Image: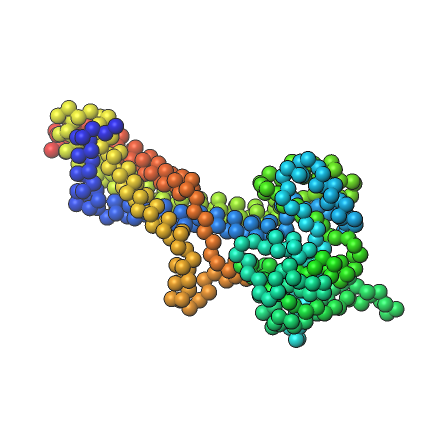
Amino acid sequence: MFSKLERKIAFRYLGAKKRGFGSVISWVSLIGIMLGVATLIVVMSVMGGFHDTLLGRIVGMNGHVVVYHQDGAIGDFDFLIDKMKQNKVVAQNVTGIVPIAEGQVMATAGGNNTGAMIRGIRMADLAAKAQTGTKVYGKKLTDVKDGELVGGAALTRALRVGMGDNISLVSANAATPTPFGSMPRIMSYPVVSSFFMGMYEYDSGYIFMPLETAQKYLNIGQSVTHIDLFLKDPENTTAVQESLQRLLPDGFVVRDWRELNRGFVGALQVESNVMFLILMLIVIVAAFNIVSSLVMLVKDKNKDIAVLRTFGVSRKSMMKIFILSGTSIGVIGTFFGTIFGVLVAIYIEPIRQFFQWLTGRDLFPAELYYLSELPSKLEFASVVGIAVLAIGLAFLATLYPAWKAANTDPVEVLRNE
């Protein structure tokens, strides 16, 4: 593609002290591309980690497809679940079906109180749903009995309760009628276990209890509020949704995780796209610096270009010389930027902890970002795409200066010398 002469001249120009690598603009271009590529890789890895971790935990706990009833409660749910399992599409795509009884409460203990969501679930189902990395303190989930609670670690800490201490739950939705009007239902239960998922929303706001306990407390008899279905492939929910809508009687509503988390999923996607475009400007600015550097190099080497042309070097070869000079800056900057970005993306959490220790400030508040650790997901395709894009921009930046060099009139230049 490039002859020995073209490579030799191009790299000699790169090493020139007055221009090429020796010039401030060329160094700025190289460092700009390196930092731009590294920043893009780190940010896109963190955004990918946020997306997968948050959706994995939110969707993983709530089901990929959820069945509701317009009346608010689903009776005879075991029969309904058996009917779902007999459906061919459901049987092929669904790994688990879990009945849930859920409601909002005020949790109080020792003068402390906080809002919470109680979720009644069969403890075997909860143990199966608890993801890898979820820490459980106290009783094993499968040993939790009727009338006992499993609270989020942050919630029990906020209420200042330990294992065996009671939490009072106050619910206006499950109000008890009295001669003096409806009274909020208040019941007290012991906390026998606590869990830490690493997701602040759950750790600070959820209380799990056996399904029978929740049904009694919520005063819904033998009903549940909804049924969660877990799929082999969370991305492929359409077939199961359509099958359930045909299978279930009127009054049932089927939603998938995208519909239930539409705003959240959309916000993550928009944020990821906007961050990519903003940070890509760093690489674009660096590419413009390559243009400036090469234009100055062409102007400085006008006499050399004219001499080379008179010795028979073609216009095409002159273009290739300057394209190679400029693209080399992009390739070198991209190479080191990729290595730096990949290393930072891999060790992002230790780096965060170091700077947090150095500054003495919480740089990643769990209550704001809903996660206890800074996530990162390094994707090979994303890294390669960013590197190719950076090199492509560097290549495009060389076209005008290379064209200008190729169109230099050797006769006019030598006449003026």
Which residue lies at the image location 58% right of the left edge and 41% below the top edge? 233
Residue 93 picture quarter: top right
Query: Visible in this render: residue 333?
Result: yes
311 or 335, which lies in front?
335
Q: Residue furthest bottom?
A: 110
17 or 341, which lies in front?
341
Q: Is residue 371 above or below residue 192?
A: above
Residue 361 picture quarter: bottom left
Which percent across, then down, holds residue 346?
A: 40, 52
292 or 390, which lies in front?
390
Asked whether, in this view, residue 188 is left or right of residue 18, the answer is: right
Which residue lies at the image location 32% right of the left edge and 43% below the top edge? 334
Residue 205 picture quarter: bottom right
Which percent across, then down, holds residue 257?
A: 62, 46
Query: Visible in this render: residue 259?
Result: no
Check the picture and name the quadrant holding the N terminus: top left
Which residue lies at the image location 38% right of the left edge and 66% below the top edge? 358
Check the picture and name the quadrant holding the C terminus: top left
Which percent across, then down, holds residue 131?
A: 56, 53
Q: Is residue 83 above or below residue 35?
A: above
Q: Is residue 138 above or below residue 5?
A: below
